[in-house]
């Protein structure tokens, strides 16, 4: 996933892997069908791995713009396409039932627009800042295609040292099963400090660039998180 303003650091390519606990909370709340799922902004496959930890009935299609991610994604699924999902809509038609993603903030609307044209996709599940709702430029779209909102009461850390954004996050959900009705608001359960700290891969992703102070904080990263 990507978006600027995550703590004090900006990561090259705006690449911010999604913490697994965020994925677990939405999977607990939604009755998503098994079968073929699409990750159109796959990155290093963080969301796919998190889903696979709790689901054994999902076959993945992964799309990622960066060639250097290919090998890692192929370790998860053989169905990997290196392409710009937004600008190359003809790159593939995977027949996926669910799309789950955490795209760049500035590209979230083009991603969702593209996904809404895919007839097989019955569920679009997107992690994004809650202030994505606020733009005048997105107002007409959101009024016409109002999503269900599943709010994370704990703020995720995306840069591996426990630093969080100064904003809240939610899963935005569009479903063909709920077409024609107003979106609903759901507040997801809180996540314990222990579960948020129990993701050594997330904490280690940026270890090479972490400051000594950040490294010292890691054993209890989330104790004071809002």
Image (cartoon, rainbow, N blue to C red):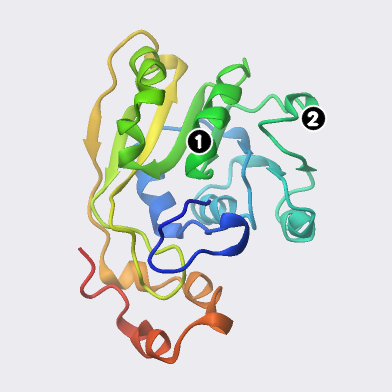
Q: Position of residue 132 (x, y in %)?
A: 36, 36
Q: Position of residue 154 (x, y in %)?
A: 26, 57
User: Closest to the observer: 79 or 15?
Assistant: 15
Q: Which residue is mark 2?
A: 91
User: Closest to the observer: 134 or 214?
Assistant: 134
Q: Residues within 10 Å of mark 2 (few under 14, many from 20)?
A: some
The quarter in which the C terminus is drawn is: bottom left
User: Closest to the observer: 204 or 197?
Assistant: 204
Front of the two marks 1 and 2: 1
Q: Position of residue 214 (x, y in %)?
A: 39, 84
Q: Is residue 72 left or right of residue 109?
A: right
Q: Which residue is mark 1?
A: 108
Nearer-N-terminus badge (1/2): 2
Q: Position of residue 203 (x, y in %)?
A: 47, 75
Regarding mark 2 in the picture, which secondary structure is present there?
Answer: helix
User: Closest to the observer: 82 or 49?
Assistant: 82
Regarding mark 1 in the picture, which secondary structure is present there?
Answer: helix
Q: Residues within 10 Å of mark 1 (few under 14, many from 20)?
A: many
Q: Is residue 215 left or right of residue 119?
A: left
Q: Residue at x 62, y 54 (%)?
A: 45
The part of the image, by quadrant, that contains residue 61 is: top right
Q: How many marks?
A: 2
Q: Residue at x 61, y 24 (%)?
A: 114
């Amino acid at each position: 996933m990507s978006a600027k303003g995550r703590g004090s650091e900006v990561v090259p390519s705006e690449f911010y892997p999604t913490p697994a606990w965020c994925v677990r909370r939405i999977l607990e709340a939604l009755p998503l069908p098994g079968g073929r799922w699409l990750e159109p902004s796959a990155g290093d496959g963080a969301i796919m791995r998190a889903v696979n930890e709790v689901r054994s009935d999902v076959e993945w299609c992964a799309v990622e713009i960066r060639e250097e991610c290919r090998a890692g994604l192929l370790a998860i699924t053989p169905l990997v396409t290196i392409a710009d999902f937004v600008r190359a809509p003809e790159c593939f038609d995977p027949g996926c039932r669910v799309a789950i993603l955490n795209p760049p903030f500035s590209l979230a609307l083009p991603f969702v627009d593209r996904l809404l044209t895919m007839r097989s996709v019955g569920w679009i599940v997107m992690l994004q800042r809650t202030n994505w709702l606020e733009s005048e430029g997105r107002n007409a779209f959101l009024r016409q295609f109002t999503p269900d909102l599943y709010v994370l009461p704990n703020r995720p850390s995306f840069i591996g040292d426990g630093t969080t954004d100064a904003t809240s996050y939610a899963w935005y959900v569009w479903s063909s099963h709920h077409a024609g009705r107003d979106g609903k608001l759901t507040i997801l359960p809180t996540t314990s400090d222990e579960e948020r700290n129990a993701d050594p891969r997330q904490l280690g992703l940026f270890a090479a660039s972490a400051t000594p102070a950040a490294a010292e904080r890691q054993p209890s990263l989330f104790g004071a998180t809002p």
